């Protein structure tokens, strides 16, 4: 079995050079490609950045030197400190006559996941030493580590790439599509970086620091705002290309090939593997996944405000705590999107947060396809959840009015308190009828309003036990967290205090 890291380089050489097969790969072609990719080794600011707010970066074949703002490009799978070893290896491969079939010890500079304890004996023992292979595979590994034609980004100051384990023909399609993505990406501000103004010393000497450009967030269009979502964001970006008539056939082929394929996330010294769930592949192929991934970032944890806004008087410790909380949430949200199973969903649901309305499709897909709940029941649960979210909103608005207060952030905090009360009532219920009774009673007291008739099917099935209480609870909690979009804003709901309309049934006395 051939390692996908090696296979990726083979597919790259065949695709870029339009070869008829792997047998056409030669020493000269390998050297030419390595030298071509050296042009993407580092990124440096172009022109003077003193006194500016941002600066444009350009690629360079020079060695990285972060102190002088020559940053190691995100496509080079190494570290700022160790990249010189890869650079020196590439220079050596360029100048020497290579016997591709000769054996060698592959260094970690060429193959990032080749560790010191990677030697295996015939008895199956692991011993100290680098893995043995051929110079051919060493060159291929170095090419994959270097090439800019692979999805990559920087996560926690480490360069990470995404390599799918596919057959050569499928990898060629993947590379061809990614090349198109890369071309589209270069039309944006992807190579722009912020310039930070610093004041040093008692005399207040001013210096300027150009920060790493935007490409470090991801070298493909619409990269995730959180690196924890990078793998699923890439799939969403490919799905978007299905909407383009020119790239649609190729994008469909690539998405189909990624279903059930092992995907490797590789960084220097480590690698992890995952697969995309069938239903997430389907959302991508429908062009819906990118909006879902974008929306995950805008979920708001109950205990914290908007992740991008600082609270008045917020201490550094509180800021760090909020940042850590959101990083953890992103990690479990990304895990849910990848695995899309019940344990991952329960972990995602454990974070108390309000969700953008765009996540309605994701939740609907999960409950209908993974939990096998009838679509009519799910739609009914949506209506029940929408009513509960509206109840919390209006109760918060009234509470602030009574106290003579106002403001979006204040309303968010009070609304979150009421949502927590409703969720706590749901979590405390041991049976379906208790679940509905406790929620209806609490919501009725908060708003003097009644649930919509459209929610009756969900409530009836939960109370009768036809819908298992655990599933009913998860449906209720998930959909009550959905914020209303502009067309569904809570303020558009007529106040039905005192009596139910003709379309509503009064459950307040259950």
Image (cartoon, rainbow, N blue to C red):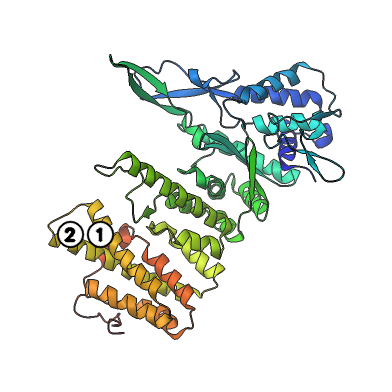
Do the residues under discs 1 and 2 have CB atoms within 8 angstroms? yes
Q: Position of residue 81 (x, y in %)?
A: 58, 25
Q: Quadrant of residue 270?
A: top right
Q: Give the SS element for disc 2.
A: helix
Q: Residue at x 32, y 50 (%)?
A: 305
Determine whether, in the image, residue 437 is placed left or right of residue 124.
Answer: left
Task: Please tell me the numbered disc located at residue 464.
Answer: none
Query: Which of these two is toward me, 92 or 357?
Result: 92
The disc, 1 or 2, on the residue closer to the chain's N-terminal end is 2
Task: Please tell me the numbered disc located at residue 414.
Answer: 1
Q: Give the SS element for disc 1.
A: helix
Q: Position of residue 497 (x, y in %)?
A: 20, 75
Query: Which of these two is toward me, 389 or 219?
Result: 389
Q: Position of residue 92 (x, y in %)?
A: 74, 18
Q: Residue at x 34, y 58 (%)?
A: 485
Can the viewer see residue 452 in this picture?
no
Can the viewer see residue 178 in this picture?
yes
Query: Which of these two is toward me, 73 or 150?
Result: 73
The residue singled out by tag 2 in the image is 400
Q: Quadrant of residue 207?
A: top left
Q: Residue at x 35, y 21 (%)?
A: 52
Q: Residues within 10 Å of mark 1 (few under 14, many from 20)?
A: some
Q: Position of residue 40 (x, y in %)?
A: 60, 25
Determine whether, in the image, residue 416 is placed left or right of residue 63.
Answer: left
Question: Where is the C terminus found, in terms of image quarters?
Answer: bottom left
Determine whether, in the image, residue 413 is placed left or right of residue 175.
Answer: left
Determine whether, in the image, residue 44 is placed left or right of residue 131.
Answer: left
Relative height, residue 93 to residue 246 (above, below): above
């Amino acid at each position: 079995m051939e390692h996908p890291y090696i296979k990726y380089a083979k597919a790259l050489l065949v695709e870029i050079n339009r070869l008829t097969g792997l047998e056409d790969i030669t020493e000269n072609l390998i050297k030419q490609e390595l030298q071509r990719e050296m042009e993407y080794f580092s990124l440096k600011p172009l022109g003077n950045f003193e006194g500016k707010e941002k600066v444009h970066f350009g690629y360079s074949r020079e060695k990285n030197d972060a102190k002088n703002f020559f940053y190691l490009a995100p496509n080079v799978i190494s570290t700022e400190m160790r990249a010189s070893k890869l650079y020196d290896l590439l220079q050596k491969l360029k100048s020497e006559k290579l016997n591709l079939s000769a054996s060698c010890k592959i260094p970690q500079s060429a193959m990032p996941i080749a560790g010191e304890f990677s030697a295996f004996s015939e008895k199956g023992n692991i011993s100290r030493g680098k893995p043995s292979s051929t110079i051919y595979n060493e060159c291929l590994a170095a090419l994959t580590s270097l090439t800019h034609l692979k999805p990559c980004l920087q996560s926690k100051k480490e360069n990470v790439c995404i390599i799918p384990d596919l057959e050569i023909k499928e990898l060629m399609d993947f590379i061809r599509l990614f090349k198109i993505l890369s071309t589209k990406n270069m039309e944006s501000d992807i190579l722009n970086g912020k310039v930070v103004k610093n004041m040093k010393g008692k005399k207040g000497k001013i210096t300027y620091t150009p920060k790493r450009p935007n490409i470090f967030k991801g070298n493909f269009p619409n990269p995730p705002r959180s690196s924890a979502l990078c793998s699923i964001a890439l799939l969403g970006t490919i799905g978007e290309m299905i909407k383009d008539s020119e790239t649609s056939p190729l994008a469909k082929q690539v998405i189909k090939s990624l279903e059930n394929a092992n995907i490797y996330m590789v960084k220097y010294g480590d690698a992890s593997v995952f697969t995309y769930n069938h239903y997430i592949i389907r959302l991508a192929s429908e062009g819906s996944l990118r909006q879902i991934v974008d929306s995950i970032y805008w979920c708001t944890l109950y205990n914290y405000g908007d992740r991008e806004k600082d609270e008045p008087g917020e201490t550094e410790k509180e800021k760090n705590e909020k940042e850590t909380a959101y990083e953890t949430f992103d990690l479990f949200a990304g895990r849910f999107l990848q695995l899309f199973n019940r344990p991952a969903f329960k972990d995602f649901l454990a974070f108390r947060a309000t969700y953008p309305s765009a996540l309605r499709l994701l939740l609907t897909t999960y409950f209908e396809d993974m939990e096998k709940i009838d679509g009519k029941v799910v739609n009914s649960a949506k209506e029940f959840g929408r009513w509960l979210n509206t109840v919390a909103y209006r109760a918060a608005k009234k509470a602030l009015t009574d106290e003579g207060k106002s403001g979006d952030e204040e309303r968010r905090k009070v609304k979150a308190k009421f949502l927590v009360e409703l969720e706590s009532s749901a979590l405390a219920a041991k049976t379906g009828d208790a679940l509905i009774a406790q929620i209806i009673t609490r919501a009725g007291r908060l708003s003097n309003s009644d649930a919509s008739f459209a929610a009756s099917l969900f409530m009836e099935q939960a109370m009768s036990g036809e819908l298992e209480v655990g599933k009913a609870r998860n449906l209720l909690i998930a959909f009550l967290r959905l914020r209303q979009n502009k067309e569904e804003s809570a303020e558009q709901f007529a106040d039905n205090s005192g009596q139910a309309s003709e379309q509503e049934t009064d459950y307040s006395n259950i």
